[in-house]
Image (cartoon, coloured by chain):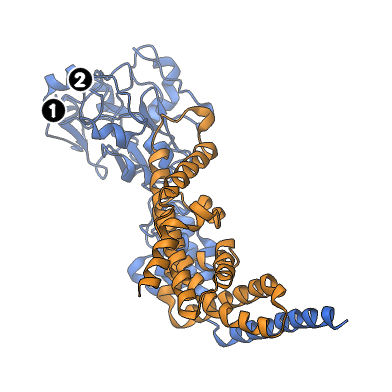
Amino acid sequence: MNAILTPVLLVVVMGFVFAVILTIASKVFYVPVDETVTNLAAVLPGANCGGCGFAGCSDYANALAADPEGVGPNKCPVGGADVAAKLAEILGIEAGSSEPQVAVVMCNGNSANAKSFAEYQGPLTCSAAATLFGGNNACKYGCLGLGDCTRACNFGAIKVCDGVAVVARELCTGCGACASTCPKHIIRIAPARNKVVVQCSNTDKGAQTRKACAVGCIGCGKCQKVCKFEAITIENNLAHIDPDKCKNCGLCSKECPTHAINNMRAKRQTAKKEAPKKVEAAPVVPPTQGESPRVNA
Amino acid sequence: MGVYFSIILGMVLVNNYPLAQFLGICPFLGVSKKLDSSLGMGIAVIFVMVMATAATWPIMRLLDSWNIAYLQTVVFILVIAALVQFVEMVLKKFVPALHKALGVYLPLITTNCAVLGVCINNIDLGYNYPQALVNAFGAGVGFLLAMIIFSGMRQKLENNDKVPKPFQGVPITMTTAALLSLAFMGFGGLV
């Protein structure tokens, strides 16, 4: 009997002793968790995209609780103004403005428009392709179309359609994950209210740009002349639209001879009608749709 | 001194736990996707192995003296689990930096078979107390080495599209682990 009783008792007693020790330890070594941090973390979306500049939502909550004024409650691009207001309410400070931002791909050279000078056979990632002579595009600035941005996106908002990355603006939260991944640095985070964008990053001279891509900005300056708000400047043979001055009138995109400037709003409504003429048809592609309704000239 | 050196060398290269003795395969395959997480895991394993040995070796003496050595496994698991939980609380309170660095891996490996294995091996091989501690440390370092090599290889594999479709994911991971293990067999007879 003893042969059974002793080990059983021993293990039971050990378990009990450990339980008591751990219970006491959990009380003695209790580290108070700041309630504000828990509340802040509950409000945040939990996507852990890093758009705020911190390692994740809980990291942002910690930083915010430690220094509410310095960090600011409006850093979360996913939650936008709603979350900023809630965070500010918990902290008891002013929310500050949180303007919605979206990613803009500064290239629309799809496989039909942008020429390639070589056949690429390496690993199918942009970062790998960019290390080999900057990729196989004739244009040194253009989208490689191998989808590093798609893999970086937590929200399914950026897809590669026909060799060029396309942002679904209604899904994009402006977290900037794609922008920091892109080895060509052609994805910008811009205010969502600016619907007219220059979709080119080529700073070569016009003739050179034309050789490489049919829809590249050649720096002709027509947009600059037509713009009534003096929002457009040409720097290094590339048009630049000042987001503060632009009123989304879309005159420049109509005037642009190479369709390097595109009006995201007009495109959505008239995509079908204009499709045969336009080179770049519909930049807004819901992710479920898969293939874009893009029609090539 | 030579004894300790040969124990460490033996545990790191010849009797490497995941690659030659096939202990601790679960974290070896599970946490080796990224280099920094495998580093955290490896360091946590070293920490827990040394601590568990420090606690279980004297306890084995007690069990021996009471003639209930067969309770070894049960008692060791209990002791290691409780100890790791306890240490985690202490660390959280007094050394938050270390607690943050070890992170989630500390409770994760509480009763990992490699940790239990190193405690039982120490008894079976008849090591004395300092030898047992050195052995545990060497086992942990061996685990860390295997983790780092393997995670480096996995990262390369994931960036590569040359892997045939049927081999992608788990199959190529297993194959890689097997080849790596085979390579470590080459150290056999070193010590």
Residue type at numbered disc 2 = Ala
Question: Which color has been applied to chain B in this rendered view?
Answer: orange
Residue A47 visible in the picture: no
The chain coloured blue is: A
Q: Which residue is mark 1?
A: A204
Badge 2: how crowded within 10 Å, few (<14), some, or many (20+)? many
Percent coordinates x, y for residue A51 in the rendering: 39, 53
Q: Which residue is mark 2?
A: A212
User: In the image, is A221 to the left or to the right of B149?
Assistant: left
Percent coordinates x, y for residue A211 in the rendering: 17, 17
Marks 1/2 in contact by CB < 8 Å: the verdict is yes
Whether A40 is drawn above or below A256: the answer is below
Q: Which quadrant would residue A105 be assigned to in this image?
A: top left
Question: Which quadrant of the rendered structure holds the C terminus of chain A?
Answer: top left
Residue type at numbered disc 1 = Asp
Query: Residue B2 or A260: which is nearer the viewer?
Result: B2
Whether discs 1 and 2 lie on one chain: the answer is yes
